[in-house]
Amino acid sequence: MLNYDYQNPTRLVFGRGTQKQVGALVRGYADRVLLVYGGGSIKKSGLYGEVTASLRAAGVSFTELPGVVPNPRVTLAREGARLCREQSIPFVLAVGGGSAIDTAKAVAAGALYDGDLWDFCMGKKIERALPVGTVLTIPATGSESSPKAVLTNEELRIKKSMGSDLLRPAFSILNPELCETLPPEQIGYSAFDMMSHIMERYFTNTPHTEVIDGLSESLLRTIMKQALILRGDSKNYDAWCELVEAGNLAHNGLLGLGREQDWACHGMEHELSALYDIPHGAGLAAVTPAWMRYAAPKHLPLFGQFAVEVMGVRGSLRDPERLAEAGISALEDFSRRMGLPVRLHELGIGGGDFALMAEKSVQKGGGTLGHLEELSARDVENIYGLAL
Ligand code: NZQ
Ligand code: ZN
């Protein structure tokens, strides 16, 4: 196990009706907020009305930044930072999924910075940020307590993240009831994204990590079980409770303790969603089995453990290749049952851009991508090809 120094300060307020506390929670920090949200789901569900009523009741005034789209654009974040600067707004409140939350985080960093906030995605250190609060409506990205914000630069057609502990939200309201309006396809995207956040950490070269391995395996099994329940009954509150909790644990940093992490699948997916504007979870579901088949031959015990402990495969350790493949196939079966793609062509993606995307994906890591296997651009291109 490796050394670590870990702190996650985000206050989590979980359960039915908790969105009604938002005004009082914000009031602990500020009496004015920038309210960041997406394309209208919160108005349709009535959440917008509840949040604004709670803000008003607590004496909090607000300026709105609507219109966040999935794979959120840097342009809107710049606009939010400008509003915060011009109106001296001291707090940013996101109501929505990862895209609204990531926009709010970028606004929070950009508001206190003289330059262009895209600089933070290019490696500039975040020195200061406004506090952020969230009301989560999709359990998937873990952004409600993660230190990252992922933005798409629509001019450059690239997707990159900025990160700092300063971006971890001050509080996040997690009411699983709010997820009951999610469309069926979004349940699959959500489940696969949180599973991927665990798998990016689970597939490691670091030995002696049994505590986190066990937590990871249990979470992965639970996510699959509860997601399948939701596939048949999207208003099952108890199942949403499990997914909301799992989504947060998957990406709040706990499961990365003391171990090298991989992140190749996320790196490959971010190129896909930057170029084709596909949902993040769908891209991950399509690319992950191919990455697994590429990496497994050199890490058969690890993939065998995944097959047995996570996917529930019964097979012989004397035939480790077959065991590893059975685990990967079982993951694909789960994806199919969730209505997720398991190949890129199912997303309408052909092979034309693979070399370019592969080159861009390794540039972010200084020439290679991932750590279980340090992939070259050629390796990444081959994996895209396998995923086709
Ligand atoms: O825009 P609205 O109208 O709100 O509709 C949204 C959007 O169309 C809808 N939606 C959200 N909550 C709903 C709902 N519809 C009905 N009922 C509800 N309760 O769902 C659609 C997708 O929303 P989005 O926020 O884009 O989804 P998600 O939470 O999956 O976020 C994806 C983004 O987060 C990034 C991804 O790359 C992607 O850009 N990630 C952020 C991370 C982080 N900050 O730590 C880590 C992740 O790995 C990921 O990269
Ligand atoms: Zn993700």
Image (spheres, helix red, strand yellow):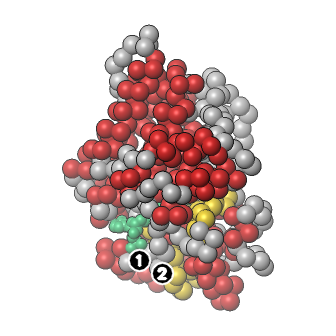
Q: Residue furthest bottom?
A: 86
How many marks on residues?
2
Image quadrant of ligand 1? Answer: bottom left
Which image quarter is the N terminus in? top right
Where is residue 76? Give x, y as percent.
57, 79
Classify 10 Å Cα crowding around label 2: few (below 14), some (14-19), many (20 and above): some
Numbered badge on residue 386: none
Q: Is residue 13 left or right of residue 368?
A: left
Q: Quadrant of residue 201?
A: top right
Circle 2 SS class: loop
The amino acid marked with disc number 1 is: Gly
Residue 358 vertical placement versus 111 (above, below): above
Q: Is mark 1 within 8 Å of ligand 1?
A: yes
Residue 48 vertical placement versus 237 (above, below): below
Residue 112 vertical placement versus 4 (above, below): below
Q: Residue at x 50, y 61 (%)?
A: 273
Q: Earlier in the sequence, mark 1 or mark 2?
A: 1
Q: As rendered, which of 362 and 58 lies closer to the eye? A: 362
Q: Residue at x 48, y 53 (%)?
A: 351
Q: Which residue, given by chain and number where applicable, does mark 1 sit on?
A: 39
Where is residue 185? Give x, y as percent.
31, 57
Q: Residue furthest front?
A: 352
